[in-house]
Image (cartoon, grey):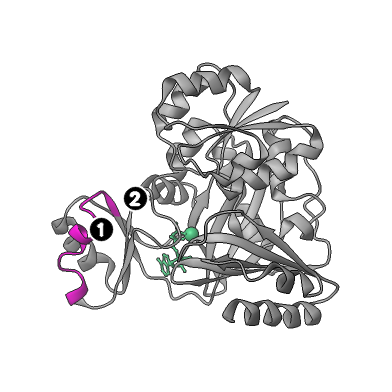
Amino acid sequence: MKIGVIGGGQLGRMLALAGTPLGMNFAFLDPAPDACAAALGEHLRADYGDQDHLRQLADEVDLVTFEFESVPAETVAFLSQFVPVYPSAEALRIARDRWFEKSLFKDLGIPTPAFADIQSQADLEAAVASIGLPAVLKTRTLGYDGKGQKVLRKPEDVAGTFAELGSVACLLEGFVPFTGEVSLIAVRARDGETKFYPLVHNTHDSGILKLSVASTDHPLQALAEDYSSRVLKQLEYVGVMAFEFFEVDGGLKANEIAPRVHNSGHWTTEGAECSQFENHLRAVAGLPLGSTAKVGESAMLNFIGVVPPVEKVIAIADCHLHHYGKAFKVGRKVGHANLRCADRETLAAQILKVEALIAE
Ligand SMILES: Nc1ncnc2c1ncn2[C@@H]1O[C@H](COP(=O)(O)OP(=O)(O)O)[C@@H](O)[C@H]1O
Ligand SMILES: [Mg+2]
């Protein structure tokens, strides 16, 4: 079976690493000459709107999937004429736009921060008056790793902020005084079968994910699964979807969804019976899902900007290096380390070792 992937970054690369043993082949559509997934499949180097190359991709593959959500709607609509596309155009339309995403949470009765659509500085001022400060202004589309957003703390922060974010459609959100951030990685098959990985506790630094730790018997697991199931059913979703939540007042508020494999699920490569990457491929290919059960105690630490010397990373016991083969650049995710340990105490100790290496 040949899978077409829109996007050729590290998520595409890890999909191919998981799918190759299942006998799958891959083709990646990505305009970047140095797309790091290209080492693991065919690279169609073209823009996402290039219909000749989209047609070529559709002719070559059995189905198409995505490794990022900011794909133009026209690209998805065009491909869907010729080849099955999972997740659906509708799922992408919602997940790529923070207004649609939060509106869906609200319609489904899932708690989410107060939010307002912002089309002008005047809208922003009116929304600040009703939502209050602190608040977060985010572009509705194209934001990632904390980019395209600004925290407004004082009244002086409000002036000129709409222009600062590019005078594009935005969303104002109430700032959530969360006690923690968790994410749930879910997978839904074509026949509706749904499985969930254990909740992951996430720590960010300047908007970029730094550390994910898989939980054991988290008290909010059932609630997170309930909220997530509502979204998956409503969208008749197929594939892996990630749900980011704020932990607040002993409950959860939904922050955002990602219609794809997710950075906070990278630990599953060694830490679960079947990884998020393999399960995404199984789901879109119409194959039976694999077990989402945890194997040992796991954490993932991102390498941002630079991968520490390979020999030092792999010298740490229980540590598995994932090097994306990308050029090193400040603020860029270039690799990660997965730790899979026998118990929580060992895991805590090994996390400190990887953190010390990152700080060197
Ligand atoms: N409403 C909010 N209240 C408090 N913190 C927030 C809020 N929105 C975002 N953040 C912080 O910023 C991080 C990135 O925001 P997010 O909306 O998840 O955007 P991205 O698409 O960049 O991941 C979140 O993980 C969280 O730490
Ligand atoms: Mg996020």
Query: What amino acid type is highlighted by mark number 1?
Result: Leu
Residue visible at 42% across and 51% down?
Answer: 102
Query: Horizontally, is 36 left or right of 112 in the view?
Result: right
Q: Amino acid at mark 2?
A: Arg
Q: 10 Å neighbourhood of mark 2: few (<14), some, or many (≥20)? A: many
Instruction: Please tell me which residue is depicted at 82% across the width and 53% down the height of the picture.
Output: 273
The kind of secondary structure element at disc 2 is loop
Q: Which residue is mark 1?
A: 165
* C-beta proximity under 8 Å, tags 2 and 1: no
Tell me: residue 27, above or below residue 258.
above
Q: Secondary structure at mark 1?
A: loop
Q: Which residues are magenta?
A: 156-170
Picture coordinates of residue 269, whole percent (x, y): 74, 55
Label 1 CB, ligand 1: below 8 Å? no
Packing grade of label 1 (10 A; few <14, some 14-19, many >=20) is some
Residue at label 2?
140
Report the side of 257 relative to 15 (left or right): left
Q: Position of residue 358 (x, y in %)?
A: 60, 76
Vertical arrangement, residue 62 with respect to residue 294, above or below: above
* Residue for point 25% across, 58% down: 165
Q: Which quadrant of the structure image shows residue 215?
A: bottom right
